[in-house]
Amino acid sequence: MNYNFLLWIALILFNTKLLGIVCKKINLPEVVGALLAGVILGPSFLNIVNMQGDNGKFIELSAEVGVIFLMYSAGLETDLKEMKQNIVASFITAVIGVLVPLVGGAAAYALYFKENISDYETMIQCIFVGVVLTATSVSITVETLREMGCLKGKVGTTILGAAIIDDILGMIVLAVVSSLKDPSVSPGIVLGKIGIYALVILALGFFMARFEIVIKKADHMRRAAIFAFAFAFFLAYISEILFGIADITGAFFAGVILCRSKIRDYVDLKVHDLSTVFFSCIFFASVGLKVQLGGMSVPLWIFAIVLTVVAVLTKLIGCGLGAKICKFSWKESIQTGVGMVSRGEVALIIAEKGRQMGLISEKLFAPIIVMVIVTTLITPILLKIVFKKDKAEVAEANA
């Protein structure tokens, strides 16, 4: 057995916390330090830790557990009343936040490489680049907003709701584009699965509500946390395997189902302890570990910069416009747009599926990785800037 993974874990935990403290000292979110720790330890700099082999697989799986915990905790902290009040805003924000990046990404690729979009295969490739930009990974945003005390409220709730809807819309768009390349992929089946998934979530919520009396008796007992953890992982599993919906979406809904339960606070405390001390550190570091800056030509580096700028602006404009249409203030609209900028692992998954199906060429994968990493790194910093006054107001209210 190779025991390097023990050293890797020690280095990741130590450096994520150390750099997190440094970032906090210079008024940046701690999560930025955790992301940078992965970049420094990974192939781009020291090359001590990587995602290869059995040890790398362990890091990758631990990271997946970490992001599930993050989204489960976000679900547990959800204010259902506020989410219902903002569901229309979340939907409109998500729809426009998918359409604008879709068009922007396709146009950026076609114009930069001077592609002939009258060619069917080329047109599909252009559209798929746009599909990659439609993705939103809210896990980084969730941790940053929680750290600043701004996760709850109209903007935080809208971002969470929009990100979940965004994930579902992105899956539909992916299915449609995939069907253009591969006729065996049926958008109708995808829509049917989503409908059944919604019914399953509602049924589980109804079932849990009926057993609230039994659940209350387990409050502040370890078995409550264990059963609640099992429920989250079960829903994450069936979401991914049976319905093709991201496991983190299932984990979020598991939290939402229990967010009004008597055991909510106790379970959230246990989730937070496990996540903060171990799993979330691994997750944030793993994002940085995936950065490999070598091997790209100058034209591809330029395209990576163009794609990153388009990725940031299209989410900021699209989601911000959606929020503004729903009568958010300009400040709230900008906050909403910034909260949706990070692409994270969702975009990587879509890009990988596209590469497997031949929807994008091998050379495009590196610029997409750069775009994902940069949007993930800058999102916490931008959130810190646009929520600065709100954070001060929260601190004053809690004083």
Image (cartoon, grey):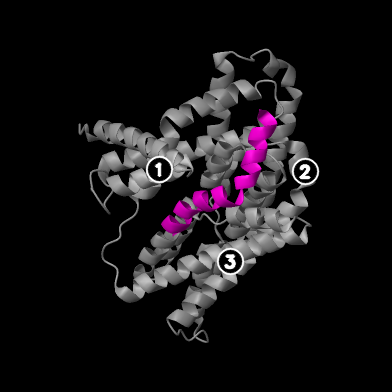
**Where's residue 15, x and y in %?**
33, 37
Q: Is label 3 in a helix, a strand or a loop? A: helix
**Where's residue 46, x and y in %?**
23, 48
How many C-alpha atoms fall within 10 Å of the one at disc 1: few (<14), some, or many (≥20)? Answer: many
User: Which amino acid type is marked by label 3?
Assistant: Thr
Give the distance between the C-alpha atoms of the residues marked 1 and 3, in whole angstroms.
26 Å
**Where's residue 179, x and y in %?**
55, 68
Nearer to us of marks 2 and 1 is: 1
Which residue is located at x 62 percent, y 68 percent? 100
Residue 84, disc:
2
Residue 33, disc:
1
Mark 3 vs 2, N-terminal side: 2
Give the distance between the C-alpha atoms of the residues marked 2 and 1, in whole angstroms.
35 Å
User: Which amino acid type is marked by label 1?
Assistant: Gly
**Where's residue 34, x and y in %?**
40, 41
Q: Is residue 84 left or right of residue 336?
A: right
Residue 276 located within the stretch drawn in magenta = no
- The residue segment tinted magenta is 372-399
How many C-alpha atoms fall within 10 Å of the one at disc 2: few (<14), some, or many (≥20)? Answer: some
Which residue is located at x 66 percent, y 52 percent? 162
Residue 371, disc:
none
Residue 384 located within the stretch drawn in magenta = yes
Label 3 belongs to which residue?
314
In depth, the one of 262 and 374 nearer the eye is 374
Which residue is located at x 66 percent, y 28 percent? 399
**Is residue 360 visible in this depiction of the protein?**
no
Is 3 rendered above or below residue 150?
above
**Is residue 101 visible in this depiction of the protein?**
yes
Quarter of the view holding residue 314: bottom right
Give the distance between the C-alpha atoms of the residues marked 3 and 2, in whole angstroms.
26 Å
Q: Main secondary structure of the magenta part?
A: helix
Is 148 rendered above or below residue 126?
above
